[in-house]
C-alpha cells in the first residue's frame, strides 16, 4: 500500500490533457509520429517529470494538471492518443518503495513497493525504470520510451 | 536338598541368549551401517549419473558442432571448385583488364597484341559484360573509334551499371575528368536508391579514397545526400535503418567464457538469462573497440592515381557479378559456420545480419551499413568504412541506445539459486546473512523431520508384546517353566531396551549426514553469492561503457571532413 503520509491515489475528474482535448490523432503518419517521439525531450519537460517524486501531485490536482500541460506543451503536434499514456520512474522515497507511476489517463500518481505489481501496461517498464540509468520511462500502448537525463530517447518495443 | 532347584541349565540358557542377543546386536549394527553405506552409494551414483548425463549432453553438442565444422570445411572446397569451374574463365578477363592498362602505361606491348588478346576473350567468354568492354578499351587505345563504340554499346547492353562505372574509372585513370563526370552522371541517372546494385560500393570507394576529385567528388557527395534524403522520406526508413544497425551491433556480443561465474551458473535457475545479460553488457566494449580501431591510424593510400584506379577496377570486376551470388552466399554461410566452430545458430545470426550484401540489389542505406560493418564482403576499403560510419552515426547512436535499453530491461534483477533442496533469491549477494539463515532454517527443519522419523520399528514392539505374552503363557505351566517364561520375558525386554537405546545412534547419524549436506550447501551458497557480487560489479562496469560508445560516435568527424583528409589531398593528385 502507498505510504499514508503521501495520501492514497488521487483521481482528478477535471483534468484535461492539452489545449485541444477533442483532437485524438493528428494527420501525421505512424512513422512520422514515431520519429517525432524519438526527438530529444526539452529540459523543461524533463524537470517537470522529475518532480513527480516529490509527491505533491498526489494531493494537489493543480500540480498534476501542470504536469499534463507540460506533456501537451512537449508534444503540441501530436494528438492525445499519440502522447504517452503514463510515466514510470524510479522512486527515491526509499524502501520499500521501488517505482512510481503517473497514469495520465486517470490522473493517478502512485508509489509501488517492491512486492506490489503495477497495472499491466506499466509493469513492463518496471525493470528498466528501476535500473536508474534513465530519468523516466514513457508508456505507450505498444512501446515504451526510456528518456535519459539529457533528454535522449531509447525506444523499446514490448 | 532334593528341593534345591538346579539353575545351572537356566544360567547356561541365559548366557547363550545373551550371546545370541550380542550377535543380533552386532548384526543389526552391521546391517544399519550397510544401509547407510548403500544410501551414500546411491547418492554418489546419482551425482555421478547426473555428471555423466551432463557430460554426455556436452559431448553430443560438441560432436555435432565438430561434424558441422568438418562438413563446412569440406563443402566450402566443393563450392569454391564449382565457382572456379563455372566462372574461372571470367578470372582471366578480370586479370587482363588491369594488365592491358598497365602494359599501355609502360608501352611495352604492341597494340595488335592487346587487340588480339581482347578479341580472344570476347570469343571465349560469351555473355560476360567485361569482354566487349575490353574490346572497346583496346580499340580506344588503337584509336579505332568505330570498334570502340560497338564494344561500348555491347558492354552497356550486357550491364549498363558496371560498364558506366568501369569507363568512369578508366577515364579517371587517364585523367580525362570531363569524360569521367559524364560517365558518372550516366551511372547516377540509372540508380534507384531504394534498389541499388552492389557495385555502388566502388563509387563510394572512389569517393572516400579521393580517386574522384574536384567536380566528381562534389557530384558524388551531392548524389549520396540526395539519395539519403529520398530514402528518409520513405515511411519507416529511419526505423528500418536503426533496426539494421541494431542487428549489426547485436551480433557483436561476445560469447560467454567457460570460466564465467561457474558456481553461479551451476546453481542459478536463471543462469542463461544472467549470461545473456553479461554478454550484452560486454558488447559495449567490443563496439567501442571496433569503432576506435576503425578511426585510429593512418589510411594506407595508393601511391598514384593509376594504382588507386586499378585497385577499384579490380574490385569492380571481381566482387559484383550477380551470377556468382548464389554460390557466394553458400560459400559465406559455410565460412561463417567454420568461423563459429560449427555453431550453426550463431553462424545463421551473423549471416542474417549481413544478408543484404548477398542480394543483387538493395537499399543504398543498407549498402552504407554493410560497407561499414562487413567491408571485406563488399570489397570496401577502410576509407569507405570510415565514411559510411560517419555518415551513419546518428542511426548507429539510436540503434546502440535502443539495444542498451533493451539489455537493461532484460537484465534479471535476481539470481534464482537452487542448491540441493533449498532455493532462494539474491539481487547482488548482499543478503548473504539472510540467505544463510534461511538455509540453516531449511536444514534445521529437515534435520528435525529426519530425527523424528527415526522411531521404534513395529517389529520391536511385536517382539516385546509377543515375548511377554508367550513368557506368561509358559509360566502358567509352573515349575521350571516359570523360569523359562521369565527368561523369555527378560529377553524380549532386553531386545526392546537395546532397540530403544539404538535410536539415539541412528538419530545422530541422520543429523550428521544432514549437517554435512548443510555445510556443503552453505559453502556453495557463499561461493555463488560472492560470484554474484562480482557479476553485478562487472555488469555495472560494462554497462557504463555504453556511454563511451555514445561519446565516441558523437565525437566522430563529419562525412565531409572524412572526405577531405590531409593525406587524401597530398597523395591523390
Image (cartoon, coloured by chain):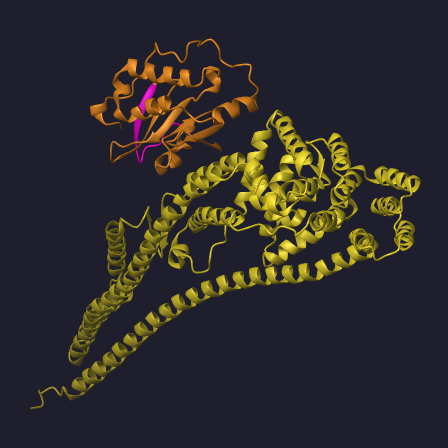
Chain colours: A orange, B yellow
Of the pair B399 and B551, the residue shown nearer to us: B551
Q: Nearer the viewer, residue B15 or B291?
A: B291
In the displayed structure image, the side of residue A84 where residue B88 appears, left or right: right
- Residue B480 lies in magenta, yes or no? no
Q: Position of residue B301 (x, y in %)?
A: 62, 50
Q: Which quadrant holds residue B529?
A: bottom left
Span of residues in magenta = A108-119
B476, above or below B231, in the image = below
Q: Is residue B326 left or right of residue B250?
A: right
Q: Which residue shows up at 35% across the image and 49% down it?
A: B536
Q: Write the residue at 26% across / 54% down.
A: B436
Q: Is residue B339 visible?
A: yes
Which of B137 and B78 lies nearest the eye of the viewer?
Answer: B137
Residue B363 shows in this picture: no
Query: In percent of the image, x 29 and y 13: which residue is there?
Result: A62
Q: Is residue A111 magenta?
A: yes
Amino acid at each position: 500500500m502507498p505510504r499514508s503520509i503521501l495520501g492514497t491515489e488521487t483521481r482528478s475528474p477535471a483534468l484535461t490533457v492539452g489545449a485541444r482535448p477533442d483532437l485524438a490523432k493528428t494527420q501525421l503518419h505512424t512513422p512520422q509520429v514515431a520519429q517525432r517521439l524519438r526527438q530529444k525531450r526539452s529540459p523543461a519537460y524533463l524537470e517537470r517529470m522529475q518532480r513527480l517524486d516529490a509527491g505533491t501531485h498526489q494531493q494537489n490536482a493543480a500540480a498534476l494538471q501542470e504536469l499534463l500541460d507540460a506533456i501537451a506543451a512537449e508534444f503540441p503536434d501530436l494528438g492525445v492518443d499519440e502522447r504517452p499514456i503514463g510515466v514510470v520512474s524510479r522512486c527515491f522515497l526509499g524502501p520499500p518503495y521501488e517505482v512510481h507511476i503517473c497514469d495520465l489517463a486517470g490522473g493517478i500518481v502512485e508509489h509501488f513497493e517492491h512486492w506490489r505489481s503495477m497495472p499491466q501496461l506499466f509493469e513492463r517498464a518496471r525493470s528498466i525504470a528501476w535500473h536508474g540509468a534513465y530519468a523516466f520511462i514513457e508508456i505507450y500502448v505498444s512501446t515504451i520510451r526510456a528518456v535519459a537525463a539529457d533528454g535522449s530517447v531509447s525506444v523499446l518495443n514490448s | 536338598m532334593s528341593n534345591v532347584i538346579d539353575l545351572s541349565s537356566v544360567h547356561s540358557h541365559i548366557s547363550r541368549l545373551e550371546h545370541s542377543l550380542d550377535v543380533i546386536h552386532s548384526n543389526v549394527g552391521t546391517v544399519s551401517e550397510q544401509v547407510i553405506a548403500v544410501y551414500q552409494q546411491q547418492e554418489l551414483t546419482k551425482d555421478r549419473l547426473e555428471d555423466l548425463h551432463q557430460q554426455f549432453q556436452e559431448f553430443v553438442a560438441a560432436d555435432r558442432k565438430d561434424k558441422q565444422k568438418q562438413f563446412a570445411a569440406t563443402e566450402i572446397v566443393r563450392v569454391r571448385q564449382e565457382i572456379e569451374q563455372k566462372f574461372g574463365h571470367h578470372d582471366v578477363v578480370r586479370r587482363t583488364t588491369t594488365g592491358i592498362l598497365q602494359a599501355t602505361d609502360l608501352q611495352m606491348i604492341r597494340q595488335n597484341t592487346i587487340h588480339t588478346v581482347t578479341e580472344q576473350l570476347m570469343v571465349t567468354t560469351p555473355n560476360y559484360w567485361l569482354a566487349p568492354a575490353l574490346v572497346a578499351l583496346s580499340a580506344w587505345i588503337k584509336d579505332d573509334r568505330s570498334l570502340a563504340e560497338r564494344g561500348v554499346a555491347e558492354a552497356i547492353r550486357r550491364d549498363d551499371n558496371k560498364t558506366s562505372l568501369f569507363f568512369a574509372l578508366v577515364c579517371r585513370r587517364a585523367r580525362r575528368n570531363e569524360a569521367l563526370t559524364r560517365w558518372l552522371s550516366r551511372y547516377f541517372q540509372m540508380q534507384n536508391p531504394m534498389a541499388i546494385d552492389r557495385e555502388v560500393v566502388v563509387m563510394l570507394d572512389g569517393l572516400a579514397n579521393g580517386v574522384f576529385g574536384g567536380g566528381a567528388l562534389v557530384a558524388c557527395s551531392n548524389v549520396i545526400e540526395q539519395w539519403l534524403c529520398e530514402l528518409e522520406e520513405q515511411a519507416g526508413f529511419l526505423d528500418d535503418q536503426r533496426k539494421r544497425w541494431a542487428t549489426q551491433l547485436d551480433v557483436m556480443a561476445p560469447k560467454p567464457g567457460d570460466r564465467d561465474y561457474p558456481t553461479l551458473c551451476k546453481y542459478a535457475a536463471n543462469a542463461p538469462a544472467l549470461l545473456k545479460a553479461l554478454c550484452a553488457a560486454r558488447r559495449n566494449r567490443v563496439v567501442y573497440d571496433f569503432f576506435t580501431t576503425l578511426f585510429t591510424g593512418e589510411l594506407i593510400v595508393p601511391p598514384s592515381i593509376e594504382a588507386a584506379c586499378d585497385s577499384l577496377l579490380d574490385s569492380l570486376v571481381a566482387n559484383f557479378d550477380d551470377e556468382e551470388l548464389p554460390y557466394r552466399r553458400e560459400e559465406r554461410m559455410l565460412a561463417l559456420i567454420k568461423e563459429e566452430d560449427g555453431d550453426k545458430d550463431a553462424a545463421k545470426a551473423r549471416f542474417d545480419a549481413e544478408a543484404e550484401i548477398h542480394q543483387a540489389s538493395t537499399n543504398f542505406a543498407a549498402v552504407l551499413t554493410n560497407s561499414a560493418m562487413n567491408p571485406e564482403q563488399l570489397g570496401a576499403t577502410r576509407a569507405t568504412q570510415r565514411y559510411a560510419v560517419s555518415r551513419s552515426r546518428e542511426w548507429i547512436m539510436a540503434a546502440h541506445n535502443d539495444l542498451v535499453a533493451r539489455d537493461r530491461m532484460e537484465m534479471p534483477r535476481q539470481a534464482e539459486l537452487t542448491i540441493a533442496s533449498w532455493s532462494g533469491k539474491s539481487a547482488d549477494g548482499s543478503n548473504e546473512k539472510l540467505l544463510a539463515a534461511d538455509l540453516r532454517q531449511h536444514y534445521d527443519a529437515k534435520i528435525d523431520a529426519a530425527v523424528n522419523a527415526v522411531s521404534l520399528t513395529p517389529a520391536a514392539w511385536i517382539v516385546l508384546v509377543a515375548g511377554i505374552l508367550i513368557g506368561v503363557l509358559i509360566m502358567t505351566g509352573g515349575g521350571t517353566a516359570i523360569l523359562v517364561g521369565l527368561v523369555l520375558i527378560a529377553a524380549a525386554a532386553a531386545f526392546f531396551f537395546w532397540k530403544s537405546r539404538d535410536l539415539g545412534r541412528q538419530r545422530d547419524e541422520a543429523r550428521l549426514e544432514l549437517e554435512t549436506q548443510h555445510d556443503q550447501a552453505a559453502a556453495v551458497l557463499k561461493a555463488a553469492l560472492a560470484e554474484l557480487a562480482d557479476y553485478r560489479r562487472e555488469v555495472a562496469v560494462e554497462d557504463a561503457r555504453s556511454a563511451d560508445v555514445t561519446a565516441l560516435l558523437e565525437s566522430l568527424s563529419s562525412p565531409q571532413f572524412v572526405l577531405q583528409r590531409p593525406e587524401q589531398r597530398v597523395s591523390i593528385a
